[in-house]
Amino acid sequence: MIVVLKQNAPAAKVEELIGNLQNRGLKTNYSQGEHTTIIGLIGDTSQVNPDDLQALDIVETVKRVSEPYKLANRKFHADDTVVQVGDGAFGGGHFSVIAGPCSVETEEQVTEAARRVKAAGASFLRGGAFKPRTSPYAFRGLKAEGIELLLEAKKETGLPIVSELTSLENIDLFADVDIIQVGARNMQNFDMLAELGRCNKPILLKRGLSATLQELLMSAEYILSGGNSQVILCERGIRTFETATRNTLDLSAIPMLKQMTHLPVIVDPSHATGISSLVEPLAKAAVAAGADGLIIEVHPHPEKALCDGAQSLTPDQFDHVMDSVKKLCELEGKQL
Amino acid sequence: MIVVLKQNAPAAKVEELIGNLQNRGLKTNYSQGEHTTIIGLIGDTSQVNPDDLQALDIVETVKRVSEPYKLANRKFHADDTVVQVGDGAFGGGHFSVIAGPCSVETEEQVTEAARRVKAAGASFLRGGAFKPRTSPYAFRGLKAEGIELLLEAKKETGLPIVSELTSLENIDLFADVDIIQVGARNMQNFDMLAELGRCNKPILLKRGLSATLQELLMSAEYILSGGNSQVILCERGIRTFETATRNTLDLSAIPMLKQMTHLPVIVDPSHATGISSLVEPLAKAAVAAGADGLIIEVHPHPEKALCDGAQSLTPDQFDHVMDSVKKLCELEGKQL
Amino acid sequence: MIVVLKQNAPAAKVEELIGNLQNRGLKTNYSQGEHTTIIGLIGDTSQVNPDDLQALDIVETVKRVSEPYKLANRKFHADDTVVQVGDGAFGGGHFSVIAGPCSVETEEQVTEAARRVKAAGASFLRGGAFKPRTSPYAFRGLKAEGIELLLEAKKETGLPIVSELTSLENIDLFADVDIIQVGARNMQNFDMLAELGRCNKPILLKRGLSATLQELLMSAEYILSGGNSQVILCERGIRTFETATRNTLDLSAIPMLKQMTHLPVIVDPSHATGISSLVEPLAKAAVAAGADGLIIEVHPHPEKALCDGAQSLTPDQFDHVMDSVKKLCELEGKQL
Amino acid sequence: MIVVLKQNAPAAKVEELIGNLQNRGLKTNYSQGEHTTIIGLIGDTSQVNPDDLQALDIVETVKRVSEPYKLANRKFHADDTVVQVGDGAFGGGHFSVIAGPCSVETEEQVTEAARRVKAAGASFLRGGAFKPRTSPYAFRGLKAEGIELLLEAKKETGLPIVSELTSLENIDLFADVDIIQVGARNMQNFDMLAELGRCNKPILLKRGLSATLQELLMSAEYILSGGNSQVILCERGIRTFETATRNTLDLSAIPMLKQMTHLPVIVDPSHATGISSLVEPLAKAAVAAGADGLIIEVHPHPEKALCDGAQSLTPDQFDHVMDSVKKLCELEGKQL
């Protein structure tokens, strides 16, 4: 960490600061330039809050040099983390697809979806029982009954299930859910992250609409630091000025995250674009960019979906996507 | 709502759609152009989800014409909502200032802050007991003890208190808190919003970092539709590409929201910028732009703050801000 | 185009507006709802400026339904435009790679780069003679001499050349340049676009850092409407809040543009990320997403580059990228 | 400037780098931590390109500590720059208003506008003769004739005039224009900036839609480094995800720029919002935030404007704005 001092900082105050920093176990490196004087902090700065330093009236700015995340940091964990559930795995050369309807609506709907996505090669069934909706007047999910229907579809098809937790109050209902999803809007729900750090299940952590990659990793760090090492990161589009697509899918996040962290990274092209015809090209692009998996919305009858029909694929369209994905995984040497 | 049809949409499917829409109680207006054919929907479309229509394969795009929020809409409630607590009020010509430390740390700290901000003219004491922090290694607040300390400061100074709820699990601790704050990261925590709609307390709803004004109003609509009409909106900076300030304070949101809604609008210049020297000019700008109040961080010793010291004012600096704010309120005919 | 009227618009003014619109050759469709009254405009609205209507005091908002671009619009030109120069072609199943140094520095540098990128399979040599630089103190290119060096490299290798025009004043120097590049910062330099519409050369039009896809197509429309139909669009990253990469590469722009327009679309992964290690995964992702080509920076000695060395590949790294790109083009059925 | 080295950087290469940096006249400060090793550069780094260093394979990242702009930097020029033309001045306590139509249309229009804005207290007449327009089908200004009409209005009213230069080709037409405006889209037209650095006229430099404050100052630095010290900066809204307003007016830019630079800063609330009813509250907010002036669109008949009518004020509305602005300037001790 680099502390840039104000030009007129009195020597006594500077010495006091250096003393304080050394008392916290940090080595300091003082360097005086003509116009700029800086103090370099050497040691474990992950627990130093730059804001504390910034608040001092002798400080102009503070710049982090080393990353504030440790457990999620590739530098300290060179090997890929592999998250495995049943036959599906993410990371370390393993590639898996999660597919299913945006929200669970009926037994027929979710079972048909499960059968079809399994046949096409998906390893996980997704389905929303609790749906975060912008409007209080929109359908908000079947809740406990939705989880029940997912578990029935799991029993019938053998597919492990993935579903989103929107409030800690409901966590008991997720006891048999295989992967708990933290949605984009909850990426910085720190109470939820801390609690999930204490549970023994893989967590699918979606990037927030306006979260930087570093913030995504800090949220993963919450879960990891609680003792749960099974975190899957998911890029699902960020908010930009562009309005042609619902969000802007940031595929550069894949190779960038792969350098920053050892955690697996998957992509959600359905929510990223909101447009079903863009799902296939972007699913393929995600594989080519090095993703460890995909999460895709599939609905037996998108035109009747109670939620996000515009971005859902039909089972036939999904078959086509999976054909392309398989060929690319083969080319990339990924094990699907 | 306007439904733009694809060029080659078969007549039978179009008729079926029109029939369905009319069955939902909407009038339709069909208009065929050379290159574009549209169906206009007339009636209460707030419960029609554009995504349902967008999913149809005969539909090219769907455009909302009327706003999806009703209870928050100025069109249906011409008069300003006034939220009053004790001697402080927001809206309808009333202007109030909420001030205090980012997080509650000690009895001395919060009491000194309370005395000073009251003396300077603030009507509410703010203080965080539960702190959302990006890093799992940072101080996350005194929790229940923090609420206790706020209540003691309230007893001593008479100032009503404002504090942030970060998880529904803790709501019972907020029984004596006067205004419950929903932080930017929880603006779309819909379970929390729904629950707060059932409580009988004013809610300070902060705009999310990447939330549009319409989304902010949809979140207010959640609270209003639950039966709680006391919602105060708060602009606190949005996330943009600019890095000189922590966020970009969107002051155009004030007059824009004033046209869109009848709810009071206040501004948080401290979090918006993250830089204490920018608080005064932006607090003044907020008054001039028509805000109904301010929320400002004040700490007796910012350089020792456990959180966000860089943006906190000293009590003396706050005195200066309040002098300026008072003069501007007088000029604007606002009752402080 | 849809004109939404204010609730209290006087009938006489509305009638006057309808009359004016009909006098401009448009059919109108008047539709009165309980809360919202709209006028639909039918006919060629590409020459109607929504701002003209928005300025009227009886108008609440104006929404475009049909696209404001005609010549660039896929709806009116179903077939892909193919831009061909020598052996290289973009669009309609043809894929080409443009490669070379960010800026032309010496004869050795540009000739070595040309030989190596040709050997690796590139069809075009790029090189900047006029360099837009943020700082007035940075190297701004060899100018006329740079163009000379490119032409020599072309003579030696046979590769057609691509170079950026930064000011119309220099256009005469570009007489023998095969493709003129309009940089991101000049995407809305309308005088330049209009002039290039009158020249008989392919134009490589880069998307501006904060340009929507519609604005990119409006800029293409400038060139097309001047009579020059050879426009290649280039996605090169947009500006967002993310700071881990220099810009955010918007690969969803590829399939989206393919639906909106018939023009070829290529991708610049070098400028998008600013990090050489991200170029290969994103180049591959671009092919998988349906791009018609790539533009990649290659420098014989990136560590000695006078400009943007951090994003340049070595010739050996470029060989590796081209191997991957070729395999993907084969899989996609693209003719490289 | 801080150079962060990769963990495994070989000592020999590090020594070579240090030698090279010292040969460029910089002092270096080497500091080795457990996980991070950095080299601090001391001296004039404004001419060191971080990209050069970033390209080295032993370098992880490079961070600037001191600002890359010198002539525009408040640190080296503590006193406010005052730009004075006729009776109007910007900066150093002087406040001026520039007003007039978006584009010059007719003699009557521009003369009436000039008379009215002068009567209301504006010190400068603005008017566009060359109009950058997104659509090739839109009105692009009267060009040379437009400048003529402005000069006539100047003769009649005595108001100095401000007009936008969109291409260097037309610069001779601007010989009698008092302040040359560089529009947002040309903020990084470096050829134009360099040329304007050689002219002896005040330059009104508008911030680009996606330009950081540092980039704005680097563009000012181009003009200053050419020898022209009369630069007025203008905040006119940046591009964000928000769609309720055309752009997001960044008023925090005013006090932030005031700390970074000595140049005067004015605000354009008309273009920032695109909505005439928002102009007054934001004009007032700009004054309260510390702006040195305003530029506001006024049209005798906005509903007949050929360009941007939706954001233009009528002369009567402008009178009202000026009344408010005058009161605020008085309160702020600004000399209008």
Image (cartoon, coloured by chain):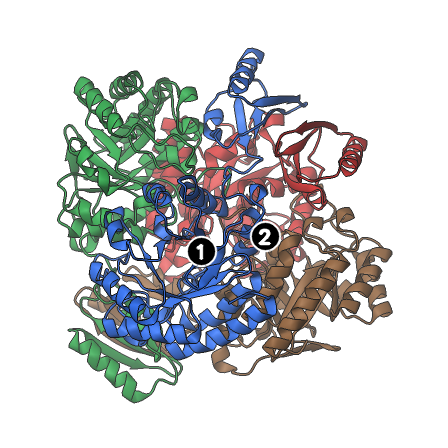
Chain colours: A brown, B red, C blue, D green
Instruction: Name the quarter where the N terminus of chain C is drawn.
Output: top right
Task: State whether residue A42 is above or below residue A138.
Answer: below
Q: Mark 2 highlights which residue?
A: B186
Q: Residue C234 has which mark?
A: 1
Task: State whether residue A118 is above or below residue C219.
Answer: below
Amino acid tagged 2:
Asn
Q: Nearer the viewer, mark 1 or mark 2?
A: 1
Q: Position of residue A107 (x, y in %)?
A: 86, 57
Parent chain of label 2: B
Parent chain of label 1: C
Q: Is residue C249 visible?
A: no
Q: Residue C258 has which mark?
A: none
Q: Residues within 10 Å of mark 2 (few under 14, many from 20)?
A: many
Q: Position of residue D83 (x, y in %)?
A: 17, 38
Task: State whether residue C92 is above or below residue B233.
Answer: below
Task: State whether residue A231 is above or below residue C127.
Answer: below
The residue lying at 18 percent from left, 66 percent from top is: D44
Labelled pair 1, 2 in contact (Cβ < 8 Å)? no
Q: Is residue C200 visible?
A: yes
| Quarter holding residue B219 | top right
In depth, the one of B110 and D275 nearer the eye is D275
CA distance for labels 1 and 2: 38 Å
The residue lying at 84 percent from left, 54 percent from top is: A106
Q: Position of residue A300 (x, y in %)?
A: 79, 55
- Local secondary structure at mark 1: strand
Amino acid tagged 1:
Cys
The residue lying at 87 percent from left, 68 percent from top is: A156
| Quarter holding residue A182 | bottom right
Q: Position of residue A159 (x, y in %)?
A: 79, 70
